[in-house]
Amino acid sequence: MATILNGKEVAESLLDAVKKDVELLGKVKLAVLIWSGNSSGQIYVKNKEAACEKVGIESLRIDLADSVTQEEILAKIEELNGDSSVNGLIVQLPLPAHIDYPKILKTIDPRKDVDGFHAYNMGKMLLDKDFEDLAPCTPKGMIKMLEHYKIDVAGMDAVVIGKSNIVGKPMAMMLANRGATVTICHSKTKDVSRYTRDADLVVVAVGKAGFLKTDMVKKGAVILDVGINRVDGKVVGDVDFAEVEQVAAAISPVPGGVGPMTVAVLLANTVTAAKKQHNM
Ligand code: NAP
């Protein structure tokens, strides 16, 4: 039977450390901009607010109306960039269709970009693992989870399925930074299983329930499931968990795997940003 990579438990220990840092810093504030029409995002933001409260980080929520203009969002971001009481600043996606997200992202001060999506922080991450201080939260959370379970990826053949800017691409780079040999698969890959069948580690970030099946997995592989899908009112990942669990050496469940790590790393990044802003 596979080892279950319990992200909920690992996230708790990370949040304990974050709480201690917040006590040391005195005051830490995270600002979150969310479009009121973003229904799935409301749940994520509520989770983030609850986690902030748990560790003593003040959260500032800015609701954006349907009619909000590009200029209004940019002005708000400039205001938050200049507000020394705000340590971290994130924009919950999606935004209304008339908003130019890349322009919004470019305007966020990289020192407050605790999601790690700004080109400056993305670019820094390419240099080496020592430059991942404000790197994207989901891949960074998976790396922390692997470290917790003492799974050393150096020398592993790793396959990342999905090449989004927020998960797949940064995860591939973080694995390469640690000595894994990485293949990235995506919707144009001719035969994903050709790569996954020989992989020591598979990261699945596709957004399709049951995408990774047992015949695609090598016995003894490590499986990280990023997917969040709703099937018959239940939240499931991208992996056929019941079957793949039988052949994997270690596997992260959904829920309770990668998701809680993402939130914990967001708060850890906020503390990192606050420390830097205080020259600590
Ligand atoms: P995304 O931007 O939609 O990217 C999905 C990726 O999957 C794309 O690169 C796409 O390829 C690839 N893909 C789609 N169909 C494929 C197929 N048949 N074979 C191989 N690759 C295929 O999604 P995302 O933001 O990375 O998120 C992925 C999943 O993770 C979603 O379920 C999301 O909800 C979840 N998620 C979870 C967390 C968490 O904290 N647990 C955080 C973020 C996201 P192309 O690039 O070629 O289109």
Image (cartoon, helix red, strand yellow):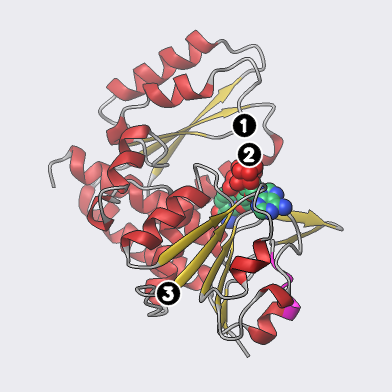
Q: Choose between 100 and 219: the one closer to the eye.
A: 219
Distance in Å between CA atoms under marks 1 and 2: 8 Å
Of the residues tagged 1 and 2, which is closer to the observer?
Answer: 1
Up the image or down, 127 lies above or below 216; here it is above
Of the residues tagged 1 and 3, which is closer to the observer?
Answer: 3
Q: Secondary structure at mark 1?
A: loop
Q: Choose between 84 and 172: the one closer to the eye.
A: 172
Residue that numbered label 1 is attached to: 94
Residue 87 percent across, percent down from the top left: 31, 36
Residue 207 in sight = no
**Residue 78 falls in which quadrant of the image?**
top left
Up the image or down, 250 lies above or below 211; here it is below
The three-letter amino acid code for the residue at tag 3 is Met
- 49 falls in the magenta region: no
Residues at circles 1 and 2 in contact by the CB criterion of under 8 Å:
yes
In the rendered structure, which segment of residues is drawn in magenta?
239-243
Residues at circles 1 and 3 in contact by the CB criterion of under 8 Å:
no
Distance in Å between CA atoms under marks 3 and 2: 35 Å
Count residues near mark 2 (Cα–Cα under 10 Å), then give few for <14, some for 14-19, many for 20+: some
Count residues near mark 3 (Cα–Cα under 10 Å), then give few for <14, some for 14-19, many for 20+: some
Residue that numbered label 2 is attached to: 41
Residue 224 percent across, percent down from the top left: 56, 67
Up the image or down, 273 lies above or below 161; here it is above
Of the residues tagged 3 and 2, which is closer to the observer?
Answer: 3
Q: Secondary structure at mark 2?
A: helix
Residue 155 in sight = yes
**Residue 172 falls in which quadrant of the image?**
bottom left
Q: Is residue 80 left or right of residue 11?
A: left
Residue that numbered label 3 is attached to: 156
Residue drawn at (25%, 49%) of the image = 127
